Image: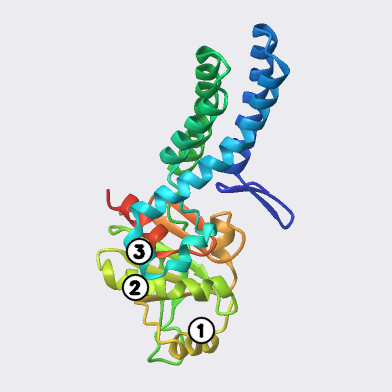
């Protein structure tokens, strides 16, 4: 199954960003071997080049993570353990590319500057092309034509039917969650705090497949007071947006266009980055 986020092979999910990275590395390695043959690299230079390709990835990822943490230090100081949660996908893209490129340049000091420049340019262009294609895939994604019952804690039954398109006009965060999902539970306080901090943004908590009493009891027990809690009993939303797994968070701008999605647990720092994209 193919989604905007990843290639799904049964239970295995391969993010497009990862696939683009692997493809870019393989092509860069192939071009490097060709250049090495033309320039008659020594065995030592060839080995150093091959080693540096993969080590540059790890150094780049480390640099991207540290730079992201540094730029969002206030959020991480509130919960320092979040610095270790790389599953929040908090990486600074440009910082990572620059860090990895600097490492590659330094490790291949015996290589000609022209060869290093060509290889780095090829890698950056391939990654840029992959990023651009993924952005284009989002351009035609808008609110699906779906309506869901709204949960009102003061009443016994869902009180009204809400169409997602009703939220158009303001930036909107739609979170797909369930009470049995541990990462959903861990990110709830982050979303609750963000709702209080950003009154100009709608936060829609779209429960997946649970009964009214279960949802109400969970929210009451943990003292969550979200303004918009909707019930997707049949699991229509994941099918409409081609999403697998919980939690999934969708970010729509005021025009109703899907500008980003996050699969997995959100940290406060990462959520703020998405909110900045919604309010440039």
Quarter assignment of residue 98: top left
Which tag, 2 or 3, sits closer to the chain's start? Answer: 3
Badge 1: residue crowd in 10 Å (few <14, some 14–19, many ≥20):
many
Instruction: Nearest to the eye among marks 1 and 2: give it.
Output: 2
- CB atoms at circles 1 and 2 under 8 Å apart? no
**Vertically, is 125 above or below 274?**
above
**Vertically, is 233 above or below 249?**
below
Q: CA distance from mark 2 to mark 3?
A: 12 Å
x%, y% of residue 54?
A: 63, 36
Query: Residue 193 has which mark?
Result: 2
Quarter assignment of residue 203: bottom left
x%, y% of residue 35?
A: 64, 12
Q: What residue is shown at x 46% (from left), y 76% (from top)?
A: 149
x%, y% of residue 80?
A: 43, 67
Q: CA distance from mark 1 to mark 2?
A: 19 Å
Which element is circle 3 on?
A: helix
Query: Residue 215 has which mark?
Result: 1
The one nearer the camera, 163 or 85, is 85
- CB atoms at circles 3 and 1 under 8 Å apart? no
Instruction: Nearest to the eye among marks 2 and 3: give it.
Output: 3
**Vertically, is 156 above or below 87?**
below
The one nearer the camera, 257 or 199, is 199
Which element is circle 1 on?
A: helix
Badge 2: residue crowd in 10 Å (few <14, some 14–19, many ≥20):
few
Which tag, 1 or 2, sits closer to the chain's start? Answer: 2
């Amino acid at each position: 199954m193919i989604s905007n986020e990843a290639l799904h092979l049964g239970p295995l999910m391969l993010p497009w960003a990862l696939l683009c990275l692997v493809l870019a590395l393989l092509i860069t390695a192939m071009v490097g071997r060709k250049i090495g043959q033309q320039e008659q690299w020594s065995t030592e230079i060839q080995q150093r080049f091959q080693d540096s390709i993969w080590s540059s990835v790890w150094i780049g990822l480390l640099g991207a993570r540290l730079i992201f943490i540094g730029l969002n230090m206030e959020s991480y100081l509130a919960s320092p353990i979040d610095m270790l949660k790389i599953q929040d996908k908090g990486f600074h893209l440009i910082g990572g590319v620059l860090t990895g490129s600097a490492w590659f340049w330094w490790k291949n000091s015996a290589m000609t500057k022209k060869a290093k420049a060509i290889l780095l340019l090829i890698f950056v262009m391939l990654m840029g092309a992959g990023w651009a294609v993924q952005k284009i895939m989002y351009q035609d994604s808008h609110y699906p034509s779906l309506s869901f019952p709204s949960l009102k804690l003061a009443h016994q039954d869902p009180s009204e039917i809400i169409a997602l398109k009703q939220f158009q006009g303001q930036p909107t965060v739609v979170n797909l969650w369930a009470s049995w999902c541990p990462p959903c539970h861990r990110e709830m306080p982050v979303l609750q705090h963000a709702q209080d901090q950003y009154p100009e943004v709608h936060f829609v908590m779209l429960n997946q497949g649970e009964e009214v009493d279960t949802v109400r009891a969970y929210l009451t027990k943990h003292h969550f007071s979200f303004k918009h809690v909707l019930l997707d009993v049949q699991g229509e939303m994941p099918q409409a947006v081609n999403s697998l797994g919980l939690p999934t968070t969708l970010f729509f701008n005021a025009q109703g266009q899907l500008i980003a999605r996050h699969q997995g647990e959100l940290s406060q720092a990462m959520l703020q980055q998405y909110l900045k994209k919604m309010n440039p």
